[in-house]
Amino acid sequence: MPQIRFPKTKSQILIFSCMAVSISLFGCTSNSQKSVPLAELKRSKEGMVVSAHPLASEAGKLMLEKGGNAVDAAVATAFAISVVEPFSAGIGGGGFLLLGTPPENSETQQYKIRALDFRERAPKAATRNMYLNEKGEVDKRASLDGHLAVGVPGTVARLYNVHKYYGKLSWSELLKPAIRYARDGFEVSDIFVSRLERRLEVINKNPAARDIFTKDGEVYQPGDLLIQTDKAQTLETIAKNPQSFYTGKIAEAIATDMAKAGGLITLEDLKDYTPIWREPICGKFREARVCAMPPPSSGGVHLLQILNIVGETNLQKWGRENPDTIHLLTEAMRVAYADRSKYLGDPDFVEVPVKELTSLSYAQKRREEINLEKVRRSSEVEPVSPEVLRSHIWESPDTTHLTVVDAERNVISMTYTINGSFGAGVVTAGTGILLNNEMDDFAVAPGVPNLYGLVGGEANAIAPRKTPLSSMTPTIVTENGRLIMATGAPGGSTIITTVLQVVLNVLEYQMNAAEAVSAPRFHHQWLPDKLMLETGGFSEVTVNELKQRGHNVVMRRGWGNANVIVMDETGILEGAADPRGEGEAMGSGE
Ligand code: DON
């Protein structure tokens, strides 16, 4: 079995231990001046897989070397993540995937980009006020812990769907590494243990979760072998018949467990689950075409909105860490997250003004409101009214992340999750499936912040079968029919701004993959009105200047665990995994 590369230094462990956003977003602060080490840069002419865990990247690389394409490699990597990084994503959750296929003639045609929504959906019995008590107060834990927090999972349906249309290798072949990791076990890392410690109390309340993820109720130690026999069995069942998750034995186990424990998901919910192919959101930044996920993720809309607000501003000339650059981007982030709170939701339930929000004229209006000398308080930055927004016409058609590019330059950028660390802390007895707590991504009540401090209203209210709003931002950037880069990240509300900065690092600052994914980050999300700066990443002069302009600066240890593949001008692929995590880039044919 390949060796796992654990974080090498204590500072890396510290950095990562703050990345699990199952704590208050701004609660993990530090004054220590450790900066993030540079990621390892891998290069390959053939193909590249980057994921959040070396064993998962290894699974994908194996598929490329067996003659599989990017889809085969992504499916194998995703199933493996479900076993070796069970706390972050898996078959009990959902997410979004972008698939890019190269044109026959790159001189005249563009990459074809498709977007697959396999996000969890609210069960049919879900109601708007399901997390309020008799007094109308929000029960904060109910949307996070236990069976009521779980949305109908989409991961298995999606992996099967994308493989059916685009895969080359047999379906059962793709599950083999994951089954092996589950059956034979793998060594748990410091990161696994730190997440487990934080969720131990909830996990210990669920006997099936306790049996698998603890040693008689105590945490595993780094280096201990974690064997998941039930999950191996479940994956074998899925390898024979993926539909069993939705209509067969696995579905019955989930529905029975839900009924017993007060959850809402029924056999009918599982049977009715379907992933949805959607039109990606694409826009232009400089000469590049940036494509990302449309609603029900907010990622694509706000990534493009912020890039549009930057517009022609020469950030390269200003410099990446210049207070003017950070100030402008922060003000653009503030506006984007304000609009997110009002307008973004499931497009099958509410009208989302995507074209207006991503229009150049709207960006121009918002840009003009920004004063480079002085910060605006978030209370002064309201989402605009629908009437004002409607006057801006769109001008032109246009929690773990993994990125794969194959020899034909097909590309997969996929972010998926079970939401908070260890999801709802619930395993369906006998299946090994750890279920998500994605219902918390709804606005459980107007103005009540979710796990990531995000607030929302009507557009993201709970309704039966509705999809909760996401920030996941799998992204593919091309130029004149040629791949430039693909990227994405976990991190709740910070996902959009992490992806934004990785994209700018490559497009604007011409960084290579390793530099782009390692560079220090900052984040603002309108509410709370705080500018998060990565500890050790910015000079005292910059920090003081930002404070001077009125920013409420909060220093925070690293977040994001992004990964990226960049294709250079000679066609060579560069891959890098975030040094804040334990992921790895692996080139095929090396
Ligand atoms: O969909 C979303 O926006 C969140 N459920 C993502 C969760 C996440 O990134 C957890 N990360 N550390």
Image (cartoon, grey):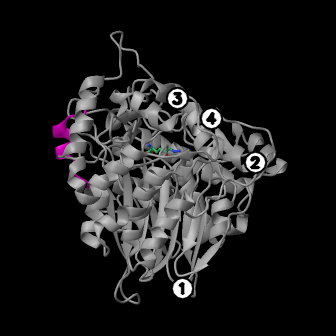
Residue found at the very far right of the displayed protein: 541
N-terminal of the two: label 4 or label 1? Answer: 4
Describe the element under mark 3 as helix, strand or loop: loop
At horizontal 55% and vertical 54% (from top left) the residue drawn is 367
Q: Magenta stretch?
A: 264-275
Label 4 and label 1: CA atoms lie apart by 41 Å
Q: Label 3 belongs to which residue? A: 216
Tell me whether circle 2 and circle 3 mark residues in contact (CB < 8 Å).
Answer: no
What is the crowding at mark 1: few (fewer than 14 residues within 10 Å), some, or many (at least 20)? some
Residue found at the very far top of the displayed protein: 135
Tell me whether circle 1 and circle 2 mark residues in contact (CB < 8 Å).
Answer: no
Question: What kind of residue is marked 4?
Answer: Phe
> Percent position (x, y) of residue 305?
47, 56
Q: Nearer the viewer, mark 2 or mark 3?
A: 3
Describe the element under mark 2 as helix, strand or loop: helix
N-terminal of the two: label 2 or label 3? Answer: 2
Is residue 392 in view?
no
Q: Label 2 belongs to which residue? A: 11
Q: Nearer the viewer, mark 4 or mark 3?
A: 3
Quarter of the image with the N terminus is: bottom right
N-terminal of the two: label 2 or label 4? Answer: 2
Tell me whether circle 2 and circle 4 mark residues in contact (CB < 8 Å).
Answer: no
Tell me whether circle 4 and circle 3 mark residues in contact (CB < 8 Å).
Answer: no
How many numbered callouts?
Answer: 4
Question: What kind of residue is marked 2?
Answer: Ser
Describe the element under mark 4 as helix, strand or loop: loop
Q: Label 4 belongs to which residue? A: 26
Q: From the viewer's side, name the closer residue of 159 and 546.
A: 159
| 562 relative to 28, above or below | below
Q: Label 1 belongs to which residue? A: 571
